[in-house]
Amino acid sequence: MRVLLVEDSQRLQASLTVALQRSGYAVDAAADGEEGLWRADSEDYDAMVLDLMLPKRDGLSVLTELRRRQRNVRVLVLTARDTIEDRVRGLQTGADDYLVKPFALEEFLARVQALCRRSGGGRQTLLAVGDLEIDTFARTARRGVTKLELTAREYQLLEYLAKRRGDVVSRGEIEAHLYGAKLDPTSNVVDSAVCVLRRKLAVGEAATLIHTRRGFGYVFDTNPAVTSAR
């Protein structure tokens, strides 16, 4: 599940990003309304968390423009304003839910989860690659009858690779998806993450699913001979 967080408070943005990532979400973040609108209009997200008081372009303006462009991402509005008029205006503009600051982190995560579930509506919620089955709502995976014990970050990587089945996925793409920022060029965190996930996928005599394309990246498939690059 992929979430866009648009919040100008660096402290709140950082804490919410960490909380979402620990819960297994892939998170992109923006600190102003213009960047938030650009990201929301350029990519597909399962949910968007949108603060109302933003620099450059306020949250209601962003939401109005998204709906005008017929972008139907589910939106959770965050605001410090707690009047009935403010809530009604936000909902009439196109928000799907409304959360007043300050709020409990548990409630925030529950509301994001609910939005992602509603966003899934007619989408496929089970991914299957060979004998691997991934439940994208429960954020669980099993290989045959064996349930895989994955951390939130490992699950994120698995789901991302499975959705890119057959593609050559570069190290940089994995960095951007999992960490949201460029890592130190000397860091081997991506290679280590792939190595650990590959080991956890090695159940019994099951076929290898993660294949290395030296100089290019990784291919996730039961048949690595058939690949495509994007």
Image (cartoon, helix red, strand yellow):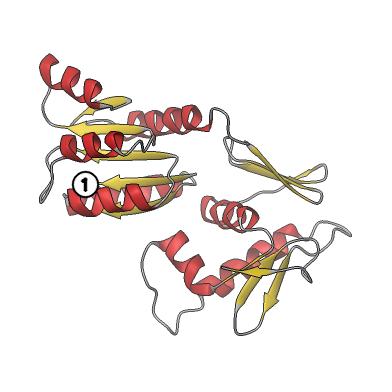
Q: Is residue 34 visible?
A: yes
Residue 141 sits in quarter? top right
Residue 65 against residue 162 in the figure, above or below: above
Residue 181 against residue 138 in the figure, above or below: below
Residue, disc 1: 7
Task: State the residue at coordinates (81%, 51%).
Answer: 130
Q: Secondary structure at mark 1?
A: loop
Q: How many marks?
A: 1
Q: Nearer the viewer, residue 55 or 135?
A: 55
Task: State the residue at coordinates (35%, 35%).
Answer: 70
Task: State the residue at coordinates (63%, 42%).
Answer: 140
Q: Nearer the viewer, residue 167 or 182?
A: 167
Q: Amino acid at mark 1?
A: Glu
Residue 192 rendering spot, x and y as whole percentages: 58, 72
Image-based side of 146 in relation to 23, left or right: right
Q: Is residue 102 visible?
A: no
Image-based side of 85 in relation to 202, left or right: left
Image-based side of 16 in relation to 88, left or right: right
Residue 116 rendering spot, x and y as whole percentages: 46, 34
Image-based side of 66 in relation to 220, left or right: left
Outermost top residue = 84
